[in-house]
Image (cartoon, rainbow, N blue to C red):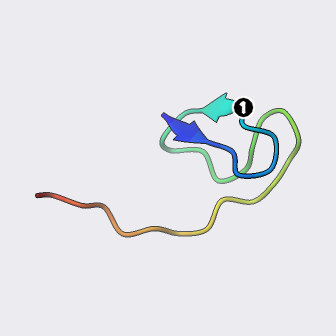
């Protein structure tokens, strides 16, 4: 789950925007450690 940096709402990992406030998520590389 992604947590929105603006409103702290939880969103699906695939989400491009927060479903609550609409903040766009920055593209982040997937860590495979």
Q: What SS does tag 1 mark?
A: loop
Residue 15 falls left or right of residue 17: left
Number of residues whose C-alpha sits closer than 10 Å to that of mark 1, classed few (under 14), some (14–19) or many (20 or more): some
Q: Which residue is mark 1?
A: 9
Q: Residue sitting at 75 percent across and 60 percent down?
A: 24
Determine the image quadrant of residue 20. Answer: top right
Q: Residue sitting at 73 percent across and 50 percent down?
A: 17
Tell how many labels: 1
Q: For the C terminus, which image quadrant?
A: bottom left
Horizontal and vertical percent position of residue 26: 61, 68
Horizontal and vertical percent position of residue 12: 54, 34
Residue 12 falls left or right of residue 7: left
14, above or below 29, in the image: above
Horizontal and vertical percent position of residue 27: 53, 69
Determine the image quadrant of residue 4. Answer: top right
Residue 3 falls left or right of residue 8: left
Horizontal and vertical percent position of residue 28: 45, 68
Residue 27 falls left or right of residue 8: left
10, above or below 14, in the image: above
The one of 11 and 8 positioned closer to us in this rendering: 8
Farthest-out residue, right = 21
Q: Residue sitting at 81 percent across and 54 percent down?
A: 23
């Amino acid at each position: 789950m992604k947590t929105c940096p603006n409103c702290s709402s939880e969103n699906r990992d695939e989400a491009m925007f927060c479903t609550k406030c609409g903040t766009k998520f920055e593209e982040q590389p997937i860590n495979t450690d």
